[in-house]
Image: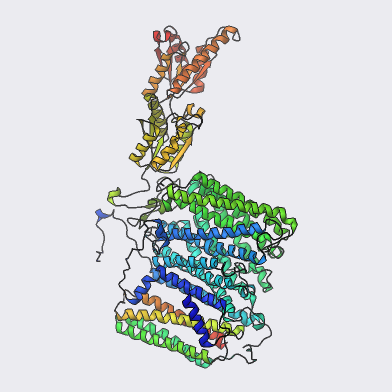
Amino acid sequence: MLFAFLLVFLLRALFGFEPLYDGGVYGGVAGLIGAIGFLWGIGCFDFWLGWAKGADISEEDHSFHGVSNWKQYFRFNTDHKVIGIQYLGMTLFFMLWGGLMALLIRTELAAPGQQIADGETYNGFLSMHATLMIFVFAVPVFGGIANYVLPIMLGAKDMAFPRLNALSFWFLPVAGFMFLASMFTGMFGAAWTAYPPLASQGTMGQTLFELGVQFAGASSIATAINFLATIVTMRAPGMTIWRMPILAWATGVTSVLAVFATPFIAGSQFLTMFDRIMGTNFFVPDQGGDVIMYQHIFWFYSHPAVYIMLLPGFGIISEVIATFARKPLFGYRAMAFSMVAIAVLGFGVWAHHMFVSGMAAWLRVPMMITTIIIAVPTGVKMWSWLATLWQGRIHIKTPMLWALGFLFTFLMGGLSGVFLGIVPADIQMSDTYFVTAHLHYVLYGGSVYTIFAGLYYWFPKMTGKMYSERLGHWHFWLTFIGTQLTFFPMHWQGLQGMPRRVSDYDPRFETVNSIETIGSYMLGVATIVFFYNIIVSWKSGPKAPWNPWRGKTLEWMVSSPPPLFNFDAVPQVVGGPYQYGIPDARHAVVFAPEEFGGELKEDTRYPVLVVANETLTSQTLIDEIRARNADGLWSFQLVVPVGDGDRSVAERRLATTLAILAESGVSATGRVADGDVVSVATEAAKEIQPNELVIATLPLAESQWMRTDSVDKVRKATGVALSHVVVPANDARALAGTSALPLVMVVATEAIGAEALATVVRTRADAEPARFTVVAPLDLPDPRWGAEANERRRAAGEAMTATINALVNTGVAVEGEVMDDAPSVALPLAIDAYKPSRIIVAGINGETAGLREAAEAAAGDTPVEAVNLGAAAGA
Amino acid sequence: MATTAGHAPADQQASPPQQKQHMNASLIAMLLFIGSEVMLFASLFTAYFFIRYGVANETWPPLKQDGEPFTLPVLLTGVNTLILISSSFTLWWGEKRLAAGDNKGLIRGLWVTILMGATFLLIQLNEYAHLGFTPQDKAFSGAFYTLTGFHGAHVLVGLIVLSLCLRRAYKNDFSHSYNTPLTAGSYYWHFVDIVWVLLFFLVYVI
């Protein structure tokens, strides 16, 4: 810094400039030299300088790869995974600052008149908010996500140019801190668009803004070149361009935009900076300058920049929706082509930001037409996402919530965008809150939602830990409601004529504005929830499996987090990336060294541990297992912990469930283990290393395990991703798998209620898994409404309840019915209704023969056997 | 490290596939970088044309602060343009020599190119000194200095790149099969030349 001041002083003295001191010039040069010094100091140029000096350097030097503790994230590193995290950390840090500015803006606007800031400061807030959010958050954050994920998705070991990658990251803090530093030198107040002549005036903050944009732009171009080179040259064998994940398409198209559009903002900022510090006259009309020229050059970048902030989000959303709808992405090629179309058209619409600027009038209609046409490829994408969801098996996990929220809010923003694209409407609505509403629906509801979808989606992959699903849901719903509260009323406000970028307003807008301020505070709270969730989960969340979402793309076929060079050997791609639900479809084959078990295939079944006892036979649990089985290759290990209860009961339940699962094609094994649930689950988890642990319990009030807090204890003890299935009590006792198991009908009249009957049924259930229905046909005396008949009916009902309870409590799937007719009349009806596969007649001594006769007469082909419970029951 | 080429025996087919280089990543990156440089100059040319055509009722060239019209030394700069264009051909000749296995020829080609480029820069600086107007004069002068200044900076970068290539050529680093840095450098040099030709015609001649 001191060096910079001296340099400028000497040069100015040398050439005789007057005055000797000019803050803008000094500050600008000091900022520039400080930035380069910082980059040099952190080691960004070491390799190239070494190369130029002829020092002993090695291309294969990987000492700047990987991290062993969190402090190393603050140092120069060439590992794309580390750089990805650095990008995300840095951009989220700037997002916090930008968000703080937004809250300050909303606080000022909470009521008419001046609250916390005068006009100048307010301009500073809104300029800082937009600048931080756009240049050092929304644009580069996608670079962070893609930096981490894309090379793995493509089957590469790293980016094409790791050192350039590191350099482009380190440009980012330079840019961001230049923006932030302007708070001490007088904040720039010309908004993020920095139109001259306003931008030609103002404090030194404006110069820092111009310099910062140059660094952010350089970062963006360098990253984009790197991504393109990576996508073109480093795809794994077999990954044709039509087998690339959509995120690769999105990143590629975005990178083309960044490479060819970003120089325009560099140009525009050079020109304003020259006007400011060199005294040129680009924007001084009476010296031949032209201020409209700035707007053309600026928007020629900044409109494509909108797509730079959206297209990667489209890619993320496509990944998330296909994965959580368990369906192939609808219209893969249309998705890819529509992104290309958006990018191409995006270069031809810039002047729709300038309809009221006084630009050449003939340019309006062509720009309106191209603007409206952009809605077509965007609509193609929207419908493709909806068609992907159509009849999909939708899993509402946090990333999917964000994706669905995105579809809604982005649609809203898209619709108001069409309004604004139409010249007469735009002339009316320009520079009102309608525009603010539109851009926040598109950039907040659009871009930021996709960012959160991506962050939650790949959080397990990046950190190796699972985030808290519950906090994720809280974060989403707070944000979603906050978004609508904050931005929806702005449409109305804008149509009523409230101008944007003004710190005060007409008192009639007070109610709406205070609602918006409340909404924005909700967004602030949501952000706190988000940061709490990711920080705590990263520190002490449960261990993430390799593939928690059962995704098909390559990043899910390596460990979480991936090894230093991603793959032990180059993977072979053999199919498309989104073939969910297609039997035998494979995206890629990943090879692993022998010590890890040789080739790892997509059809390797990973284990899932299921722990349950009383709820084991419930439909809820069985449905959970079936759903997992339907869209992933899992093998299920059922473990039934038995404390001091009856072991045979547990065995019976296990046999029933295993039989039902086997029938629906689920690969499952099981065992009964002695001990309490925590120790049994921990042992089993240690033994089979499951990808997921499912614990089923009764609801809180009835569950023995919940009473001792076992589920949380297991979560802590194992560190495995855990799903807690709560089974309603009546479901736990209900006849499981209604159609899956053979039905055995037990016919008894005198014997109901007797222990011997229950024993017979249990023995039968132990011999072969089956479900039972006990039928008691009563030969009632006339009149059937008489007291005697009623008494018999009541007694039979009680006895039946006792039998059923005794059986259900010991793990037999059974139900019962008392019928109002003699066996010869009742049994044909019962057999017709239940269609049993076998009939057992359980009589006591004399009645056995008669019952058997009636049963055989009604049974047709169904085998009938008779048991005489004899004296044992009679007693 | 030597690797054996040839087909793997049938019983080793389970070995992992190898990453194939589809194209040369460095050259792709250089072309993309040049694409973004083209756009940077495009933005500056846009500014220039707005200034040129956006100002109504004024003759071209516009008048300076002191009332005299701006004049540019077309003839001298024309000669300078020829020098720069020729330097592209000398670089191309050097690369041809390298392709023929003649490292000496490459070194000669690079030397001539670098000297011509440096000559161009010196003549440009001399021109700056004798133009008679400063960047602060009118919008036109600002655009003129910005365009030529940016181009001059690019020539300087090109010279540094070519000097580094020259150093490596002296160390015999380049061959027929490995010459990526040299090729990338020459792409850049040709780009700098083409931009100058455009600039010369659009700013000096018409």
Number of disc labels: 0
**Viewer-proximal residue among B78 and B117:** B117
Against A780, residue A87 (above or below) is below
**Viewer-proximal residue among A608 and A14:** A14
**Viewer-proximal residue among A103 and A235:** A103
The image quadrant that residue A105 belongs to is bottom right
| Residue drawn 36% across the image and 61% down it | A65
The image quadrant that residue A746 belongs to is top left
- Is residue A338 visible in the rendered image? The answer is no
**Viewer-proximal residue among A388 and A407:** A407
The image quadrant that residue A63 belongs to is bottom left
Instruction: State the image coordinates of residue A793 (x, y, percent, origin top left).
Output: 55, 12
Q: Is residue A585 left or right of residue A508?
A: left
Instruction: State the image coordinates of residue A409 (x, y, percent, origin top left).
Output: 60, 53
Colour scheme of the rendered structure: rainbow
Against A616, residue B88 (above or below) is below
Against B37, residue A634 (above or below) is above
- Is residue A195 visible in the rendered image? The answer is yes
Quadrant where the C terminus of chain A is found in the figure: top left
| Residue drawn 39% across the image and 85% down it | B114
Instruction: State the image coordinates of residue B160 (x, y, percent, origin top left).
Output: 40, 80
Q: Is residue A643 left or right of residue B102?
A: right
